[in-house]
Amino acid sequence: MLSSIGLSGINAAAKAIEYAGQNIANANTTAYKQNNLTLSDMVVANGPGGLAAGAGVQVAGSNQNFSQGQINTSSNALDCAIAGSGFFRMMDSGSGSISYSRNGAFHLDSENYIVNSLGAKLTGLNATDGSISGGAPQPLKINSSSIQATVTSEAAANINLDAGASVVANA
């Protein structure tokens, strides 16, 4: 009995170190939030209806922190952030399996689908003329054929020329 009590403590401490290591390793991972381990005391039945503490410790579970984190600006036009609660719904390209993430670092794949770094496609409901239509969420694709290039009639430049440079004749 005493050896199992000691062994339970060693196992719980090893698990706690594992969780601390995961938190440290993911400290700078986009959208990662701390994962906490919950431990509980194991009790032994002590006669009819009585419980006695002191049978060791066990891992009761873990608690993922999904609270609002800091939202940072990005130079990528497809990067998104979730303010408050919620998740991005992702679909695996190969298996079609659904997963959820708070990581909003997205880019376009070769077929113009909005994907994450693993290639999972961001899903959403179809919208036409600003109205969301029903149905199941589908992978979101940017239709670049409907984006028209706009020709400008004016341009402005703020430049500084080198006064010591030689003059180049018109070609």
Image (cartoon, rainbow, N blue to C red):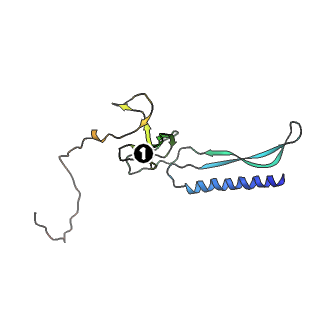
How far from the left and from the top, in percent, is residue 101?
Answer: 51, 43
At 89% across and 39% down in the image, what residue appears?
A: 47
What amino acid is found at the position of numbered circle 1 in the picture? Val
| Label 1 environment density (alpha carbons within 10 Å; few <14, some 14–19, many ≥20) | many
Query: Which quadrant would residue 170 be assigned to in this image?
Result: bottom left
How many circles with numbers are drawn on the protein? Answer: 1
Between 86 and 138, which is closer to the camera in this rendering?
138
**Farthest residue, direction left:** 170
32 in relation to 48, above or below: below
* Quarter holding residue 159: bottom left
Looking at the image, residue 18 lies above or below residue 150: below
Question: Going by the image, does 11 lie left or right of 2?
Answer: left
Q: Is residue 162 toward the left or the right of residue 84 in the image? A: left
Q: Quadrant of residue 64?
A: top right
Left/right of residue 101 with respect to residue 18 in the rendered view:
left
SS for dot 1: strand
Image quadrant holding the C terminus, namely bottom left
Give coordinates of residue 36: x percent, y percent: 64, 49
Left or right relative to 7: residue 115:
left
Measured as percent of width and height from the top left, residue 135 is found at 43, 29
Taking the spot 81% from the left edge, 55% from the top edge, the residue there is: 3
- Residue at x 21% of width, y 52% of height: 156
Residue at label 1?
Answer: 115
Q: Furthest-top residue in view?
A: 134
**Where is residue 10 drawn, in percent x and y?**
74, 56
Q: Residue furthest front?
A: 95
